[in-house]
Image (spheres, rainbow, N blue to C red):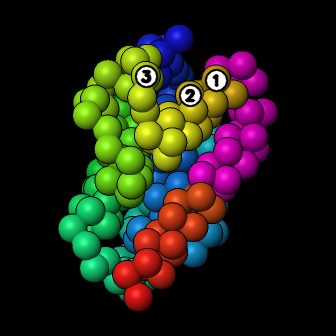
């Protein structure tokens, strides 16, 4: 099943987790520490409303110093990551979360495409629909993570959240390493 289909069929919790996982993997671009979004993950487990915790995460990440971005691709990647945070739905209805999760999916794939040294001529939408021939490795890994998060939640419901967080943590480490390697290459 394609990523587009998985998002279309996901329930409210899976949509919230999907968007949050995309944002969580991109936190290194915003200068945040690895646990800055953990309170939001816990709201998904408890089924609580998250407006207060979203506001707190926004404030904390706004106060963080953005990592140096000496090139246009990293500046654009950070802008896309900030957009994921800024567009968190204030009222987390299923449809608002579906739009947000979909936008986060696209942004996260674009970010990974910007940071992958391999060229990719295919549009992000075709990747999300399942056309993966010749996909750059960083983008392919992000696509797999997005699909895995949605499949975990579809198959295990709330019990899949811990595994989804682990998938997200792994992706965050990868992106942090990519950003660090690029910075060392410029030095």
Disc 2 target residue: 147
Image location of residue 151, percent across then percent down = 64, 23
Image location of residue 10, percent across then percent down = 51, 21
Give the mark, 2 or 3, whose residue is nearer the N terminus. Answer: 3
Foreground disc of the pair 3, 1: 3
**155 part of magenta stretch:** yes
Labelled disc at residue 133: 3
Q: Is residue 63 above or below residue 169?
A: below
Magenta highlight range: 153-171
At x 37%, y 81%, the residue is 186
* Quadrant housing the C terminus: bottom left
At x 51%, y 42%, the residue is 137
**157 part of magenta stretch:** yes
Disc 1 target residue: 151
Could you tell me which secondary element the residue under label 1 belongs to?
Answer: helix
Density class for disc 1 (Cα within 10 Å; few <14, some 14-19, many ≥20) is many
At x 63%, y 30%, the residue is 148
Labelled disc at residue 164: none
- The answer to which of 81 and 8 lies nearer the viewer is 81
Mark yes or no: residue 173 visible. yes
Position of 179 with respect to 163 (left or right) is: left
Image location of residue 29, percent across then percent down = 41, 68
- The answer to which of 144 and 32 lies nearer the viewer is 144
Density class for disc 3 (Cα within 10 Å; few <14, some 14-19, many ≥20) is few
Q: Are marks 1 and 2 in contact (CB under 8 Å)?
A: yes
Position of 51 with respect to 100 (left or right) is: right
């Amino acid at each position: 099943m394609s990523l587009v289909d998985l998002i279309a069929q996901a329930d409210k919790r899976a949509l919230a987790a999907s968007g949050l996982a995309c944002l969580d993997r991109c936190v290194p671009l915003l200068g945040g520490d690895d646990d800055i979004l953990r309170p939001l993950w816990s709201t998904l487990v408890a089924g609580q409303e998250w407006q207060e915790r979203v506001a707190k995460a926004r404030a904390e990440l706004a106060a963080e110093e953005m990592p140096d971005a000496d090139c246009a691709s990293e500046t654009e990647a950070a802008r896309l990551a900030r957009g994921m945070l800024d567009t968190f739905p204030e009222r987390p209805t299923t449809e608002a979360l579906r739009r947000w999760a979909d936008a986060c999916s696209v942004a996260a794939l674009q970010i990974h495409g910007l940071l992958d040294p391999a060229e990719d001529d295919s549009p992000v939408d075709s990747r999300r629909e399942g056309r993966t021939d010749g996909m750059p490795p960083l983008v392919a890994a992000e696509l797999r993570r997005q699909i895995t998060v949605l499949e975990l939640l579809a198959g295990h419901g709330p019990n899949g959240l811990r595994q989804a967080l682990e998938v997200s943590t792994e992706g965050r480490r990868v992106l942090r390493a990519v950003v660090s390697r690029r910075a060392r290459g410029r030095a």
